[in-house]
Amino acid sequence: MFRTGHYGVSLLVFAPIGYTLVSTGAVAPAFVLGATMLWLSMLPDVDHKLPAVSHRGPTHTLLFAGLVGGLFWGVATLAIDTLGTLTVSLGETSVGLATFAFAVGFLTVVGHLVGDALTPMGVNFLWPLSGSGYSLSLTTADSAVWNYGLFVLGVFATAAWVSAALGVV
């Protein structure tokens, strides 16, 4: 999947979560989640720049998603140590900043993995526990129709869900 397709898939993963957050009044956390998912949607492809790391290898796994989530959690924990207890309001409930940060990092990588799972090459979600790759084989990674189609669908889905949550439609 190319960058445009990954943006679209990230938006599709974000849309129902964004709806839930916005409908509970958590507009700022929804914005942070959506913006981060778009900004870092290509993060697992850092493997192209790493020597001795194969493409769609360790950086395309749930383990890597957990590590990125853990890094976000760690940064949030440092902020909490410096600034004191911080929470993220999710409507009538709230979660700790570190927990929210972990979810943001984890979901950012998962959005990328979902996009790559649409291609014949697929991804090995469970590495190192399993050597099996998972693929829906719906399209090749370089399909302009799928990449732009997913982008348009992601933009539409996000706009529709957020509009519904705000009561616009």
Image (spheres, rainbow, N blue to C red):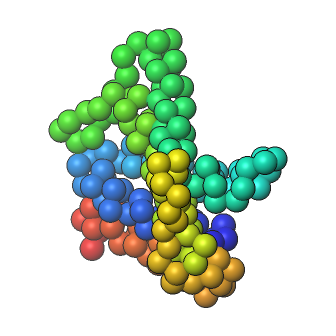
- Front in this rendered view, residue 16 or 51: 51
Instruction: Give the vertical position of 155 relative to 113 (above or below).
Output: below
* Quarter in which the N terminus is drawn: bottom right
Tell me where residue 148 sits by quadrant. bottom right
Instruction: From the viewer's perspective, tell me whether residue 93 is left or right of residue 116.
Output: left
Q: Residue at x 38, y 63 (%)?
A: 15
Tell me where residue 162 sits by quadrant. bottom left
Instruction: From the viewer's perspective, tell me whether residue 82 is left or right of residue 16.
Output: right
Q: In the rendering, at what x and y percent does residue 73 appear?
A: 47, 30
Let me know if residue 38 appears in the view. no
Q: Residue at x 36, y 48 (%)?
A: 27
The number of discs equals 0
Extreme residue toward the left, this view: 92
Instruction: Give the vertical position of 169 relative to 165 (above or below).
Output: below
Let me know if residue 129 appears in the view. yes
* Quarter in which the C terminus is drawn: bottom left
- Front in this rendered view, residue 138 or 13: 138
Instruction: Give the vertical position of 35 relative to 93 (above or below).
Output: below
Q: In the rendering, at what x and y percent does residue 85 appear?
A: 36, 16
Q: Residue at x 49, y 33 (%)?
A: 70
Q: In the rendering, at what x and y percent does residue 137 appear?
A: 52, 81
Q: In the rendering, at what x and y percent does residue 50 appear?
A: 78, 47
Q: Residue at x 41, y 59 (%)?
A: 14
